[in-house]
Amino acid sequence: MIFAFGFFQAQDVEELQEGFFFSETSKNFFRVDIKKPYDYYKVSSCSDEAQFIRAQFEGGDASFNRELFRYISAYVDKEIYVVNGTFFLHMDIDKAGKVTGLKITPRVDNSEGFLRDLKFAVGKIKKNWTPSKCNNVPVDSRIRIKLNFVTESIDV
């Protein structure tokens, strides 16, 4: 009976935290909300009548979110940066499913180090994408992912 009650409570907590990833250090509590769905831009050469299939990450969007947060946690130093706000990750996916372009916006004062570390973290993700297709022909495409960062600092 105790086990069953504890199990149901764990399920409630997990559902409440969906879409949020947490990482803690001795002084900072770091949260990244990776918004779903991603923004997929239809290729301009693909007409409205054509069948368009968006790029897919190996394992799906949830797998990409986990990988992205894992590398953000590993390579973005939470002791140096106190980041609050929304950033956009723009990724170009080529016909072979490789990430060929990576841009992070907006540019804000004194953010060069943070954006460099974030770009490095995203670049460490080695799984491929299935490219977008227009009428079953692979095409280059672009994806925009909204990341909302919240850092809470405490004095220890």
Image (spheres, helix red, strand yellow):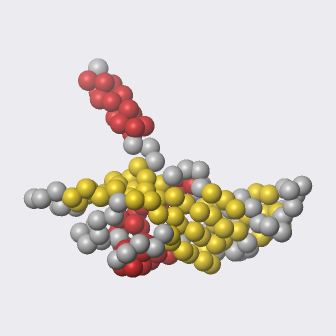
Q: Is residue 100 visible?
A: yes
Q: Quadrant of residue 85?
A: bottom left
Q: Quadrant of residue 16?
A: top left
Total number of numbered discs in the rendering: 0
Residue 100 left/right relative to 23: right
Q: Is residue 15 above or below residue 125?
A: above
Return the residue nearer the eye: 105 or 147: 105
Residue 122 left/right relative to 139: left
Q: Quadrant of the C terminus?
A: bottom left
The residue located at (23%, 69%) in the rendering is: 79
Q: Quadrant of the N terminus?
A: top left
Residue 129 left/right relative to 149: right
Residue 134 left/right relative to 93: right
Q: Quadrant of residue 91?
A: bottom right
Q: Please state the horizontal and vertical placement of residue 95, each as a whole percent of the image.
A: 74, 73
The residue located at (35%, 70%) in the rendering is: 76
Q: Is residue 7 visible?
A: no
What is the residue that sits farthest to the right in this orientation? 49
Q: Please state the horizontal and vertical placement of residue 82, each as a whole percent of the image.
A: 29, 65
What is the residue that sits farthest to the top in this orientation? 1
The residue located at (38%, 32%) in the rendering is: 12
What is the residue that sits farthest to the left in this orientation? 156
Q: Please state the horizontal and vertical placement of residue 137, each as a whole percent of the image.
A: 83, 67
Q: Please state the horizontal and vertical placement of residue 78, each as a whole percent of the image.
A: 28, 67
The residue located at (89%, 55%) in the rendering is: 49
Return the residue nearer the eye: 125 or 112: 112
Return the residue nearer the eye: 15 or 110: 110
